[in-house]
């Protein structure tokens, strides 16, 4: 008789086979290896770099106050990571998949294997990486001399535990979503949670409540000699999370994906062809089709919603000031681009060949697709800015100009980068499942790292420019960025207009 | 003196190369208006790639390709206006409805009154009930039938059907044969690629056999017996 241990061993072995299979299909091995090295180097940099910063030598009461505030809210940041792990797993329909649904359908892949695969892929997520780096950097900043190693070990074990627990919660929520009326239940409960948090915040109770969570004890104990105890407890919690998570995974994966099936058989009554006041009707029709391809996808709709509201609500609830808010539009725009923009042509799937037979100029096709990608990025990052505006009120002129300039720069920057990638490295993918990604996981990790790095560095520059006394400086500083990104976008467009290149993209995306 | 009309499709020495792979290696092909030609051959013979070149999707690497008077290398847009193409795989935008596909195709081809024709075609292919349903949930056969509808909507001068019978039920096959017959009757040139020899012979008067990216035979469809076909494939 087979024991439950055999099941886990088989699942672990199968996960290894799937990972090896995916690894063999990595096209740019050198770039992937370099990407991994960069991620590890950045992790080491964030974990160690800030510890060299001597607050006392600065002698600034404002910096000391900021440091005390960061130290006091470290427990809340730990809790925030758990929230992120849950929302990421929720947003991706339980968790990412090592093999797409259609590819996996012919293989005997167990739910435990799917669960382990989703856990392995959890770090292939921009928000996950940024939050982990943030936790490491803040911990390095506040850890006492000699206590850095222990504190960072605790951070890493917390990251493991929170990811495992978040994954288990994500599967459970996906299971509910797949049950009759589950979508309504999840939306109602999700809305109620947001309203409750907003109510607690307005009543001034949210801060004390979050600080009273066990995560505050974890954050504080991590900086004491008792850190090994916390690390062992968290490792045990992570192991328990992994084991327990297999149950809801099996439950959820055994149910039909109702929302996807409903969307796939969705009825959309005929509408008249658009007759725009300006611009060509051809472009308007193409735009409508492209927008429909985005908003009729469960994964993209859910992802845009989470990206639009999540960081903005964090800014609202955590009371982030404009200097901290500056980094968010770039990260949310990058997140939106990672939903499909990095492989923008995959919206058409196998229909790309048919689209290419239509008598419309290739330039119009490129322009419309770039516009739709830009719209999604501007929308989610715009919501973040508006929510920050609600929290902080109108900023001083120079800060306002810096925020707007930074927002514009990062959107154009990300657009130029992802349209270049879309033409240079297209992939044939099926995005019908919210668990699917627009590119292989190794590529996605590289994309996420590069976008977050570029946009964060840009945001840091504009944060610095917001401190200068002249409001025109950030606007002028934006010009070279915009010029460079526009040049890059034009180059990608020119490449798309070449018949050979376009044929390569079309045949790759349509997988024919 | 009457002048012989130029063939609708002229292919001379067509080469298509994808990196190191030569998908088509010197195909010659002529197809007349008002005739249906079957394109036959084994997997990888170059049928679908040739079709894609004729549809303006893939540019020729070398050789001359003229479709309805348009040079495929220099006037891909002109080719696309003249051609109706049913691709061999998929060919549908997953989150759009059949009606939205028809609307886009008709508007971009400047068809002022297309709704009646579109509705009629959908009914003929028994897709009227699902005209406003997202195609992502369609079966393979339904997708194939809709691809034939899209290819024939604008009464193209050149109708290219790549594996139109694949996974299609007998009623869908009949409807497709009817579309081919209608196209021939109105003077269009039809090129039909399939592995189903019997259906190819039923629909077409001419047959061209490709092997390894080359044309190995061109004949009257009636002359292509089972034995002769097998001999050409080996």
Image (cartoon, grey):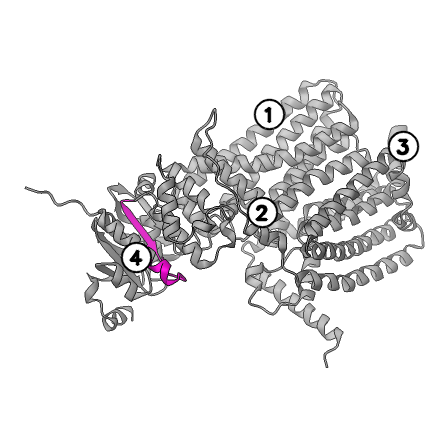
Q: Where is residue A428 in the image (x, y as percent from the top left)?
A: 51, 53
Quadrant of the frame with the N terminus of chain A:
bottom right
Horizontally, residue A414 falls left or right of residue A512, namely: right
Q: Nearer the viewer, mark 2 or mark 4?
A: 4
Q: CA gap, disc 3 to disc 2? A: 46 Å
Q: Is mark 4 on a helix, strand or loop?
A: helix
Disc 3 from disc 4: Cα separation: 80 Å
Residue under the point 22% across and 50% down:
B185
Front in this rendered view, residue A228 or A146: A228
Asked whether residue B104 is drawn in magenta, I would say no
Can the viewer see residue A33?
A: no
- CA gap between label 1 and label 2 equals 35 Å
Give x and y (percent) for residue A85. Answer: 75, 50
Residue bounds of the magenta highlight: B156-174
Crowdedness near tag 4: few (<14), some (14–19) or many (≥20) residues, C-alpha within 10 Å: some
Mark 1 in CB contact with mark 2 (< 8 angstroms): no
Residue positioned most to the bottom? A1
Label 3 sits on a secondary structure element that is helix
Q: Residue at x 83, y 41 (%)?
A: A52
- The disc, 3 or 1, on the residue closer to the chain's N-terminal end is 3
State the residue at coordinates (67%, 41%): A305
Q: Nearer the viewer, residue A369 or B37?
A: B37
Q: Which of marks 1 and 4 is in front?
A: 4
**Horizontal relation, residue A419 to residue B163: left or right:** right
Q: Which chain carries label 4?
A: B
Query: According to the image, label 1 marks what residue?
Result: A479
- The image position of residue B62, as x and y in percent, is 30, 49
Residue A297, numbered circle:
2
> Which residue in the protein does label 3 denote?
A65
Mark number displayed over residue B177: 4
Q: Do labels 3 and 1 share a chain?
A: yes
**Sequence order check: which comes first, mark 1 or mark 2?**
2
């Amino acid at each position: 008789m087979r024991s439950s241990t055999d099941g886990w061993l088989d699942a672990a072995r199968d996960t290894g086979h799937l990972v090896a299979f995916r690894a063999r299909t990595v096209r740019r091995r050198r770039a992937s290896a370099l990407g991994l090295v960069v991620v590890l180097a950045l992790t080491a940099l964030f974990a160690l770099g800030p510890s060299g910063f001597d607050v006392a030598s600065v002698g600034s009461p404002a910096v000391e106050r900021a440091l005390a505030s960061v130290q006091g809210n470290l427990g809340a940041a730990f809790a925030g990571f758990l929230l992120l792990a849950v929302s990421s797993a929720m947003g991706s329909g339980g968790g990412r998949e090592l093999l797409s649904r259609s590819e996996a359908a012919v293989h005997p892949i167990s739910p435990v294997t799917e669960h382990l695969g989703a856990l392995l892929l959890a770090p292939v997520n921009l928000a996950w990486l940024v939050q982990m780096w943030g936790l490491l950097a803040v911990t390095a900043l506040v850890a006492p001399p000699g206590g850095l190693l222990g504190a960072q070990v605790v951070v890493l074990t917390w990251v493991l535990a929170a990811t495992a627990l978040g994954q288990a919660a994500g599967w459970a929520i996906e299971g509910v979503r797949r049950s009759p009326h589950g979508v309504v239940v999840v939306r109602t409960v999700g809305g109620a949670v947001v309203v409750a948090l907003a109510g607690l915040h307005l009543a001034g109770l949210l801060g004390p409540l979050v600080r009273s969570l066990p995560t505050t004890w974890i954050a504080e104990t991590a900086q004491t000699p008792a850190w090994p105890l916390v690390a062992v407890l968290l490792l045990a919690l992570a192991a328990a999370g992994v084991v327990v998570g297999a149950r809801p995974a099996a439950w959820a994966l055994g149910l039909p994906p109702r929302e996807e099936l409903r969307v796939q058989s969705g009825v959309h009554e005929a509408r008249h062809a658009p007759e725009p006041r300006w611009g060509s009707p051809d472009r308007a029709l193409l735009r409508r089709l492209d927008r429909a391809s985005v908003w009729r996808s469960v994964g993209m709709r859910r992802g845009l919603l989470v990206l639009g509201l999540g960081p903005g609500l964090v800014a609202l609830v955590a009371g982030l000031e404009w200097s901290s808010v500056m980094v968010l539009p770039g990260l949310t725009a990058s997140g939106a681009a990672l939903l499909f923009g990095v492989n923008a042509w995959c919206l058409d799937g196998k229909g790309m060949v048919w689209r290419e037979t239509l008598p419309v100029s290739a330039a119009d096709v490129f322009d419309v697709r770039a516009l739709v990608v830009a719209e999604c990025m501007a929308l989610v990052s715009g919501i973040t800015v508006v929510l920050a505006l609600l929290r902080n009120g109108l900023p001083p002129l120079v800060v306002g100009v810096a925020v707007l300039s930074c927002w514009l720069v990062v959107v154009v920057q990300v657009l130029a980068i992802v349209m270049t990638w879309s033409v240079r490295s297209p992939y044939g993918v099926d995005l019908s499942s919210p668990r699917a990604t627009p590119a292989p996981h190794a590529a996605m990790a590289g994309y996420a790292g590069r976008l977050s790095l570029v946009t964060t560095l840009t945001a840091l520059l504009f944060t610095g420019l917001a401190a200068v006394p002249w409001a025109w400086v950030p606007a002028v500083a934006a010009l070279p960025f915009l010029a460079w990104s526009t040049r890059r976008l034009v180059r990608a467009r020119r490449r798309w207009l070449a018949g050979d290149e376009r044929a390569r993209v079309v045949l790759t995306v349509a997988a024919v | 003196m009457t002048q012989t009309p130029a063939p609708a499709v002229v292919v001379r020495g067509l080469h298509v190369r994808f990196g190191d792979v030569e998908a088509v290696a010197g195909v010659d092909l002529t197809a007349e208006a008002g005739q249906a030609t079957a394109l036959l051959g084994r997997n990888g013979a170059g049928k679908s790639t040739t079709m894609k070149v004729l549809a303006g999707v893939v540019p020729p690497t070398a050789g001359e390709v003229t479709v309805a008077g348009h040079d495929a290398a220099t006037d891909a847009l002109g080719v696309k206006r003249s051609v109706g193409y049913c691709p061999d795989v998929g060919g549908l935008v997953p989150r759009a409805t059949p009606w939205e596909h028809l609307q886009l195709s008709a508007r971009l081809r400047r068809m002022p009154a297309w709704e009646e024709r579109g509705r009629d075609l959908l009914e003929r292919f028994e897709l009227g009930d699902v005209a406003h349903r997202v195609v992502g949930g369609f079966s393979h056969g339904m997708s194939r039938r809709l691809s034939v509808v899209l290819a024939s909507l604008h009464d193209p001068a050149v109708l290219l059907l790549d594996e139109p019978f694949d996974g299609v039920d007998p009623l869908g096959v009949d409807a497709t044969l009817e579309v081919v017959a209608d196209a021939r009757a109105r003077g269009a040139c039809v090129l039909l690629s399939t592995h189903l020899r019997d259906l190819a012979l039923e629909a077409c008067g001419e047959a061209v056999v490709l092997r390894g990216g080359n044309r190995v035979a061109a004949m009257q469809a009636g002359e292509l017996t089972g034995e002769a076909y097998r001999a050409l494939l080996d």
